[in-house]
Amino acid sequence: MRISGFASGLDIDSIVKQLMTAQKAPLDKLNQQKQLVEWKREDYRTVSTKLVTFQEKLSSLSLSSAIDAKKTVISGASNVLTATPTGAASNSVLNVEVISLAKASTTVLQGTAGATKISDIYTGGYNGTENVIKIGDADPIVFNKDDTIDSLMNKINSNSKTGVTAVYDSASGKLSFTSKATGKDNTIALSGGLVSNSSLVIESTTPGTDAEVIINGIKTTQSSNRFTVNGLEISLNGTTPQGQSTQIEVTQDVDKTVETIKEFVNAYNDTLSFLNSMTSQERYRTYLPLTTEQKEAMSENEIKLWEEKSKSGMLKNDSILNNTISQMRLAVMSDFTTDFTLPDGSVVKSMNLTNIGITTGDYQQKGKLQIDENKLRAAIEANPDQVASFFKNVDGASNTGYSQTDGLFNRLKKIEQDSLKLISEKAGTSRFSTDPTTAFLPQSEMGDQLKSFDKRISDVQLRLNMLETRYYRQFTAMETAMNKYNSISSSLSSFIS
């Protein structure tokens, strides 16, 4: 039990606090060291999310629809079809003649009033067991004695597996079933008790038909009016008038390719600038993390300004980041193996960014890329396939590092992957997350450091608690002795008087 200094007149709590302040210096130092590791680990996480974001951007730009985009020009009987290039499309010309469209199969049944109960239309009376209608290979549609034609139609249309659309015409009392898919192989087959034992009689069946199309002189059939040829998604809208045809010309979409490369340059420059800023931030080593006592003596604004300097430069000259920067700058300036036609018509066996109008700025730009758009457009128009390959090609045989046949996007992705792995091993960051709040992995170099700090801090805190208890015990003993002395002194004074 702690007692105050009634006998001695001393402020024991204040004295003990002063004694402990000096003893707490090692604990404060440990907490400051731990805080620095935590701040550095958080900066690594920020870097990691930035690199993952850049990786994802590279993946999206690698798509053929982005870096190797195509466009179509349709002439002739242009209203009979539409054509959209996919990533597999190549520069080509197709002459198309649509002879006939693909059609769906339709079956019509002579029916009855929509509100009529199904149990009332069975020719031999409803026995409660033949309560199904089966459409093709789909599971049977089950109904009960209270179902009507209307409710049966709803059951059929709400079941996507039947593959048909059911319609009831109240004027004629007829029912029709139309297959959702076109083509000769999608004919409707109805079966079950409702078809064989009721007054619903199949009136007509129109089979499905395939589309007939002539493409560059070759006659072909298609089960659907939408199909893909040579990387083109073609949708048929009608038949070609006699003596006419439709021409589809597939060419490079230079505007789209230029915009894709601009996006890349912006993303690259942004990532590089960020890494350069992290490695060049000033480190204020005299601005150590504040202790609890120091914060109590400062205003919120003073704390904020102090901690800005304390946190600055956590990754200054960091070896992982410096290597990432160097590798990125090397990758963008390295040659790519391919035949490339120069403006003078000569062909070389390799190319690099300078061949397509992309260069690095002066020393102060620290590796940022700059674009000469006119030169870039000219290169794409003259070498569309080579430019696309320069950016998107993947060397499947290269498992580690990159080769001269790896496209620039893949080179940079491999560099980012290596850096993310090193950062993850050191700081416990995720190699795949763009969320800056993602939890750290349990095992890492810095994670082990923090665990060690926690153990040492706990040990020091325990020792300080024991020391503080000893101080209070000593002062308590002193107070007890002084109380006893004061009591004896008071008794003697009373006896003498």
Image: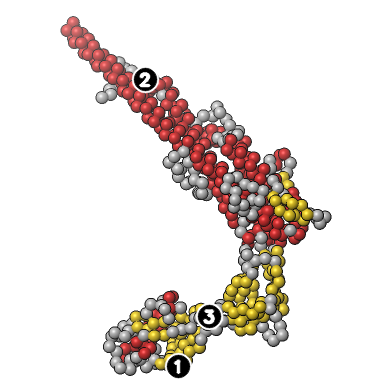
Three-letter residue code for mark 1: Glu
On the rendered structure, is 146 left or right of 49? left
Q: Is residue 300 visible?
A: no
Residue 15 numbered mark, or none: 2
The foreground one among 220 and 203 is: 220
Three-letter residue code for mark 2: Ile
Label 1: which secondary element: strand
Label 2: which secondary element: helix
Res 481 quadrant in image: top left
- Outermost residue, top side: 496
Could you say where residue 19 lies in the image, as x and y percent from the top left?
38, 20
User: How many discs mark residues in the rendered view?
Assistant: 3
In the depicted structure, whether residue 109 falls above or below residue 456: below
Could you say where residue 235 lies in the image, as x and y percent from the top left?
61, 75
The residue that disc 1 covers is 203
Alpha carbons under labels 2 and 3: distance apart: 94 Å
Q: Are marks 2 and 3 in contact (CB under 8 Å)?
A: no
Dot 1 or dot 3: first in sequence order is 3
Alpha carbons under labels 2 and 1: distance apart: 107 Å
Dot 2 or dot 1: first in sequence order is 2
The residue that disc 3 covers is 182
Q: Residues within 10 Å of mark 3 (few under 14, many from 20)?
A: many
Q: Residue at x 64, y 54 (%)?
A: 393
Residue 375 numbered mark, or none: none
Q: Residues within 10 Å of mark 1 (few under 14, many from 20)?
A: few
- Outermost residue, left side: 495
- Outermost residue, front side: 397
Q: Nearer the viewer, mark 2 or mark 3?
A: 3
In the depicted structure, whether residue 230 falls above or below residue 494: below
Three-letter residue code for mark 3: Thr
